Image (cartoon, helix red, strand yellow):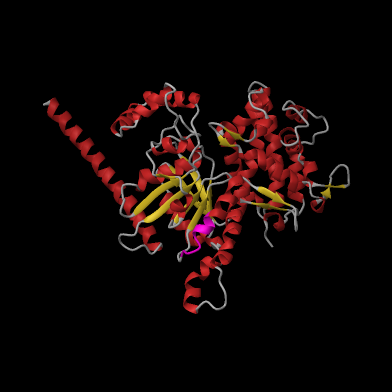
Amino acid sequence: MVGSVETRKSYVYSNGGSIQKNQNICNLEEKLDELRTILNKADGDPIRIVGVGAGAWGSVFAALMQDSYGQFRDKVQIRIWRRAGRAVDRATAEHLFEVINSREDVLRRLIRRCAYLKYVEARLGDRTLYADEILKDGFCLNMIETPLCPLKVVTNLQEAVWDADIVVNGLPSTETKEVFEEISKYWKERITVPIIISLAKGIEAKVEPVPHLITPTQMIKCANKNFRFLLGLTQKIEDDLLNSISKLAAGVPIENILYLGGPNIASEIYNKEYANARICGSEKWRKPLAKFLRQPHFIVWDNSDLVTHEVMGGLKNVYAIGAGMVAALTKESATSKSVYFAHCTSEMIFITHLLAEEPEKLAGPLLADTYVTLLKGRNAWYGQMIAKGELSRDMGDSISGKGMIQGVSAVGAFYELLSQSSLNMLHPEEKKHVAPVELCPILKMLYRILITGEQSPQAILEALRDETLNDPRERIEIAQSHVFYRPSLLGQP
């Protein structure tokens, strides 16, 4: 009798699980069909989603899409581009072999795919693995310890993007402009306008004609202005042809370029830790894409403020490096880290008042993103390694196993921008006009440590202990009591 009850329970639970699984599949297909309708996709013509760049976040994003929508092969195709030829060093191959053998599901998958032997050979030093090769099996070179699902990997950029409906920029900001200028050449004969979602958080500074920051979405927009010249359009082109390609002739419109970011760690998102993000840009695309990207463990909100959210994503990387230095130099002293946090957040608040008309709206997202980056981000890790002497600035900001450390170039960009005399403001104590950077001592010190090399990492503590350092509250009061907002700093009129 008991056995029959247990059997019925087992059946109910099993059947309930099947019902839930089928319901989830139906929900995913409904979201996919809704996006297909918005994109005017005909039957038999799949949505083509392409990730450009295979760092941690770019690879995880592609894997999330593959896990969710890859089962609907006739309706969507998901692939990722990365450069060929990047060899996996022996130490990484040995570690990868350990990861594989610690995960029964991964081990069985590789054996089924007849892919296990090459990892054995690489472990023994009898074979060289390549980054694009292991990515096909679900291993991102910057995130070896978190196996992903197998991915469709393309190493030819033209093949990857020429017919893409949605392009996801997973490149560092330092590579975005160059790669998208090349992509624009492959889009010169397109009729439809692609959608671009940028995941990049780095920035660049320009001082001419006026001081301003350039974000990855702005780099993408500028790169694709070249369509007009590549197409060689003239007034003699017949009107019907001109009308059909006029949108692309002017480049990808800014309404088709969006930014996705939030307080999250790529590996944790893939492991289904609860996370959230914002997709920012025009209402035409951000709302349907937010719905399409949303998952039970990954909530995607939408926001209209594209450039400001991008810049804030770059700003927190600056101070994350300093946080890592302080943590390492003080042996994880909670008191010292809290002192640093008070000063760095006051500087970020000060800077946001220069960059944003309504900075209060950014406080929550900026602090959340800063918090998670200080806890577990690669920029904080980099600061720790620099302080411990395990890395040096001479080694550059592209680190094996971690990828590009975006905060280094961001330090240079913010320092250069805020040093411009055209932005001078009245110093509250010295009663003279100074550049904004003079009110950001942490930023100044990070510049001297990371960019010019004038100071050692120890100097970050000296900056915190400077008796002349103002109370962080005073810096916030200065920002809140003055009209500092400069639209031109973000390239806005």
Q: Give the total number of marks visible in the rendering.
A: 0
Asked which quadrant contains residue 473, the reply is top right
As drawn, the residue found furthest toward the right would be: 431
Q: Which residue occupies 44% across, 43% down?
A: 298
The spot of residue 239 in percent (x, y) is 50, 79
Check the image and report above or below for 339 versus 411. Answer: above
Q: Is residue 300 covered in magenta?
A: no
The answer to whether residue 53 of the structure is visible from this angle is yes
The spot of residue 126 in percent (x, y) is 42, 24
Q: Which residue occupies 32% across, 53% down?
A: 29
The answer to whether 160 appears left or right of 177 in the picture is: left
Q: Is residue 184 covered in magenta?
A: yes
Q: Which residue occupies 57% across, 74% down?
A: 234
Tell which of 88 and 4 is nearer to you: 88
Asked which quadrant contains residue 444, the reply is top right
The magenta stretch is: 183-190
Tell which of 227 and 363 is nearer to you: 227
Asked which quadrant contains residue 8, the reply is top left
The spot of residue 458 in percent (x, y) is 73, 25
The answer to whether 200 appears left or right of 441 in the picture is: left
Check the image and report above or below for 29 versus 415. Answer: below
Tell which of 270 and 209 is nearer to you: 209
| Quadrant (top left/top right/bottom left/bottom right) for the C terminus | bottom right
The answer to whether 299 appears left or right of 381 in the picture is: left
The spot of residue 115 in percent (x, y) is 34, 32
The answer to whether residue 271 of the structure is visible from this angle is no
Tell which of 329 and 132 is nearer to you: 132
Q: Which residue occupies 40% across, 54% down?
A: 48
| Quadrant (top left/top right/bottom left/bottom right) for the N terminus | top left
As drawn, the residue found furthest toward the front would be: 126
